Amino acid sequence: MVQIVCFMASIPLSSICPSAALSFQEKCKDKTKSSVLFGKEKQPLYMKTKSRGRITMAVAVNTSRFDNITMAPPDPILGVSEAFKADTSDMKLNLGVGAYRTEELQPYVLKVVKKAENLMLERGENKEYLPIEGLAAFNKATAELLFGADNPVLHQQRVATIQGLSGTGSLRVAAALIERYFPGAKVLISSPTWGNHKNIFNDARVPWSEYRYYDPKTVGLDFDGMIADIKAAPDGSFVLLHGCAHNPTGIDPTPEQWEKIADVIQEKNHIPFFDVAYQGFASGSLDEDASSVRLFAARGMELLVAQSYSKNLGLYAERVGAINVLCSSADAAVRVKSQLKRIARPMYSNPPVHGARIVANVVGNPDFFNEWKEEMEMMAGRIKSVRQKLYNNLSAKDKSGKDWSFILKQIGMFSFTGLNKAQSDNMTDKWHVYMTKDGRISLAGLSAAKCEYLADAIIDSYHNVS
Ligand code: PLA
């Protein structure tokens, strides 16, 4: 509640500020219960005044209209980077957010990105607004990268694609589409999943529930549990699937398992919703990492796909991605696209151009495209090599006989170590290794030189903290 204390002034307030004097003289009556409009709600405003003189003044003290807003907790992933920055230790290591670092643990801008940017500068491109759906050349390139340029679904014009604010923004637009056109439909998400998925669906007011995914006993996929939960969900639910490099577990279904997942989704008339945040980054191959999506598309299924270029092109801060809706007819795709635009317009109007131009230039130029693939293989290769090195150190140093080979079976940027919250806290508090509290470490932030240190930290935390 706002409290305003009024007190006497010896000079007429109107001589300082006529409008202020007028408004306070009008408002400041003894113990006035007035009201102010704040947002849509009318809130009472109490003013305690003593009008002994001609002029009274009111001063707000120590209160705010925002007093009922409590402190939000730090983000479980991006908050880790903030804590890392505040640590002054030389040993500190940031394995929290999934962001690629060089062997020197420095951020990396792809050479091909710099080349594309130079070209853009030379051309003197303007900064006009993009259309609501984004850059046409980007939308074409992104759908082709995802489905494969010769995929019939593209020739049949059955895909509605709009540029989005990277993976997160694209997921959010898709969630809004679900909320608007499938009211009450549930989204099934894996347990565990990327932490922001739940926030996205909560904010979009889309109900969700979890399907089993990770089995701590085998440190692998709980395939039977996953299938059973997808079967048990109401017909026509959306099933959120990580296209490749499942975050946080690093465990993907095998091609045979993907077929069975597609079978049950088809049987149940569910709609698959792929989150593809790591295309090319899991295996080093753009095609291989899109094979799950392509398998479902080849079955004639309708589906949604959110794409991100944060990791595979290192365009984290450019916020470039897309939402694709594969429909069973070209006519439906046109209508869906019109509604995606209608959702985007009041949210952010139209997307940023810079990253979209980079993607369009890299994909549209065969030399650049090949260079990109080489750099992506290099990045994926460096992650694989530190994964191997971490495993080697863990198995050589841990004399307890524990089997650490699950680390080698996981793919992508992350390793899901199996460390619990207390053990993860120990990693940070004692060893200055910053990671998420679910036991996930980003191997993209690890150098070969730090593998031994990290193995020591993991062994200590695993065996000495329960
Ligand atoms: N989907 C998944 C599965 C992700 O892991 C991420 C990013 C995104 C979407 C969204 O990324 P974008 O909006 O930048 O395209 N996950 C990171 C970063 C890498 C984050 O949490 O925002 C992570 O550390 O999990």
Image (spheres, helix red, strand yellow):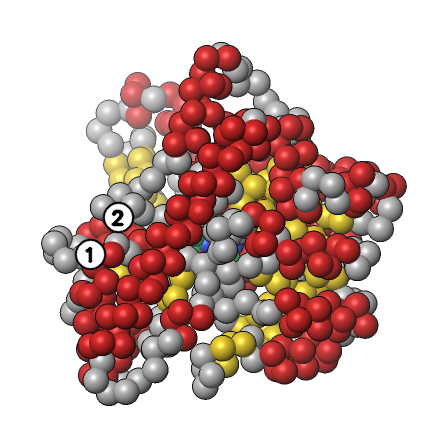
Q: What is the three-letter code of the residue carrying label 1?
A: Ala
Q: Which of the numbered marks, if any, corresponds to residue 449? A: 1
Q: Quadrant of residue 223?
A: bottom right
Which residue is painted at 46% across and 13% down in the image? 122
Q: What is the three-letter code of the residue carrying label 2?
A: Glu
In the displayed structure, would residue 51 be above or below residue 430? above
Q: Which of the numbered marks, if any, corresponds to residue 103? A: 2
Asked if labels 2 and 1 touch by Cβ distance under 8 angstroms, the answer is yes
Which residue is painted at 52% across and 28% down in the image? 367
**Location of residue 174 in the rendering, given as x and y in whole percent from the top left corner:** 66, 50
Q: In terms of depth relative to the viewer, which is nearer, 113 or 423?
A: 113
Q: Label 2's element?
A: loop
Q: Label 1's element?
A: helix
Q: In terms of depth relative to the viewer, which is nearer, 400 or 34?
A: 400
In the displayed structure, would residue 196 be above or below residue 42? below
* Quadrant in the picture for the C terminus: bottom left
Q: In terms of depth relative to the viewer, which is nearer, 217 or 44?
A: 217
Report, in whole angstroms, how far the alpha carbon at label 1 lies from the one at label 2. 8 Å
Please state if 126 lies on the left or on the right of 343 as rendered.
left
Q: How many marks?
A: 2
Which residue is painted at 27% across and 77% down in the image? 395
**Location of residue 29 in the rendering, given as x and y in whole percent from the top left corner:** 41, 42
The answer to whether residue 129 shows anywhere in this view is yes
**Location of residue 380 in the rendering, given as x and y in whole percent from the top left corner:** 42, 51
